[in-house]
Amino acid sequence: MMRDEGKKVIWPSYLDNKKSRKEGRRISKKKAVESPKIDEINIAANELGYAPETEYDKSYPASWWEKSGRIKIKDLKNKTKNQVIEEIAKQIQDKRDKGKSKTSEKQTKQQAQIKQQTKPVNRK
């Protein structure tokens, strides 16, 4: 097995706020996200300009039975690995929040339509 020189590995466990530091979380719970998926991490890293390589069939050594996948990043742009992990987590959280706000806007519009359709009739 040959090591990829200069590439940094990012496991989903590094970003997961449900994991303890002992289980592999690398950033604070405030900055971490809930159950990050490998595709979310890949998209976020790509959007941040890191050109990630995704390996879906890999298992984090501490939880070898789970095929969580991993991301490899070559150029960290003069940042530490933890800074990159925090950026990726923030990007994922922003994307999730944006999705929630779209969903809540849609729900608000639907609720307004329902209220209009079910207005009480004035009887005299």
Image: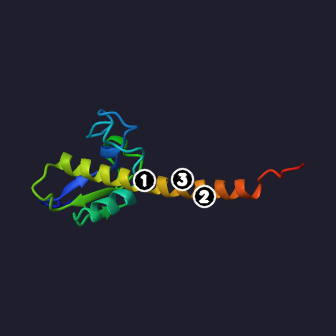
Q: Name which of mark 3 and mark 2 comes first in the sequence.
A: 3
Q: Name which of mark 1 and mark 2 comes first in the sequence.
A: 1
Instruction: Tell me how far mark 3 sits from mark 2, CA to CA.
Output: 9 Å
Residue at the far left: name it: 78
The circle drawn on residue 109 is 2
Q: Which residue is mark 3?
A: 104
Residue at 40 percent across and 37 percent down: it is 18
Element type where label 2 sits in the image: helix
Q: Name which of mark 1 and mark 3 comes first in the sequence.
A: 1
Local packing at callout 3 (Cα closer than 10 Å; few below 14, some 14-19, many 20+) is few
Q: Amino acid at mark 3?
A: Ser
The circle drawn on residue 121 is none
Q: Which residue is mark 1?
A: 96
Q: Amino acid at mark 1?
A: Arg
Q: Depth-wise, is mark 1 or mark 3 nearer the camera? A: 3
Q: Are marks 1 and 3 in contact (CB under 8 Å)?
A: no
Q: Is residue 28 left or right of residue 115?
A: left
Local packing at callout 1 (Cα closer than 10 Å; few below 14, some 14-19, many 20+) is some
Q: Depth-wise, is mark 1 or mark 2 nearer the camera? A: 2
